[in-house]
Image: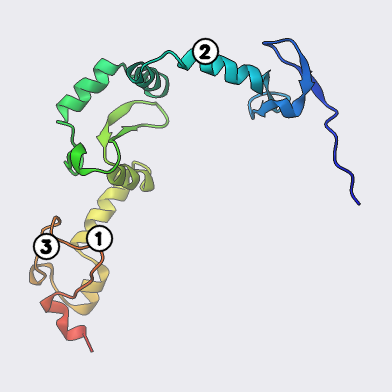
Amino acid sequence: MPRARKFTKTKVCTDCQVRKFQKDFHYSCKAVTGRREKCKTCTRRNHRVKYHGMTQEQKRGLHLKKVYGLSVEVFDSLWNYQDGKCAICKRPQADLRRALCIDHNHLTNEVNGLLCARCNSCLGWFGDSIDGLMAVVEYLKSPPARVIIGVSNEAIPTVDPSKASRRKFTLSKANSSLCP
């Protein structure tokens, strides 16, 4: 029967100055030892002291400043400039399930605008590449299957995106000859 492994390595918490086992410290990839400098108990206590008395607006302001370098006033002016809508698809916040995302450049941390989750994901998939997005536009203008089948773009009726169903697939009248 294998024996339970004992924690033999210890370290001293920089906050409470108590020697504790390493399992009592959170993991950290940045620390040389692989563990944080403050023990879990001190970390929880400090977090409670810091955030317990804050209002939601103060927490929001702290998050915006820490993650994006924005003040609440700058965020609100960006929101008003976009009328509370996604900068790409123009859907209003009221029509969305989730809040608008703050789109930013991950290398420079420069904020670009507010996007819905769908548009933000699309940009992310293409790595914010203009060339990649232009290739998508070209693909939509001239899909390979239409070239092979011989149907021009003019023969295919346009569909209002608000009325289009994502779950149903129907062939247009121009392609009805493909049905068995």
Q: Is residue 46 above or below residue 131?
A: above
Instruction: Locate residue 9, reporting x and y percent.
Output: 83, 26
Q: Secondary structure at mark 3?
A: loop
Q: How many marks?
A: 3
| Camera-side residue of 34 and 11 | 11
The answer for how far apart the CA atoms under marks 2 and 3 are is: 56 Å
Is 6 situated left or right of 17 in this image?
right
Q: Residue at x 13, y 71 (%)?
A: 152
Q: Quadrant for the C terminus, please.
A: bottom left
Q: Is residue 111 above or below residue 136?
A: above
Instruction: Locate residue 103, reporting x and y percent.
Output: 32, 34
Query: Disc 2 or 3, which lies upstream in sequence?
Result: 2
Instruction: Locate residue 28, reporting x and y percent.
Output: 64, 28
Give the label, 2 or 3, closer to the camera. 2
Query: Disc 1 or 2, which lies upstream in sequence?
Result: 2
> Amino acid under label 3?
Val
Q: Which residue is mark 1?
A: 139
The answer for how far apart the CA atoms under marks 1 and 2 are is: 55 Å
Q: Residue at x 20, y 63 (%)?
A: 165
Q: Which mark is residue 49?
A: 2
Q: Is residue 111 above or below residue 55?
A: below
Query: Disc 1 or 3, which lies upstream in sequence?
Result: 1
| Camera-side residue of 44 and 28 | 44
> Amino acid under label 1?
Tyr
Residue farthest to the bottom, as pictured: 180
Q: Bin the neighbour count of mark 3 within 10 Å (Cα to Cα): few under 14, some 14-19, many 20 and up.
A: few
Instruction: Locate residue 156, reporting x and y percent.
Output: 11, 70
Give the label, 1 or 2, closer to the camera. 2
Give the label, 1 or 3, closer to the camera. 3
Q: Which residue is mark 3?
A: 159
Q: Residue at x 13, y 59 (%)?
A: 163
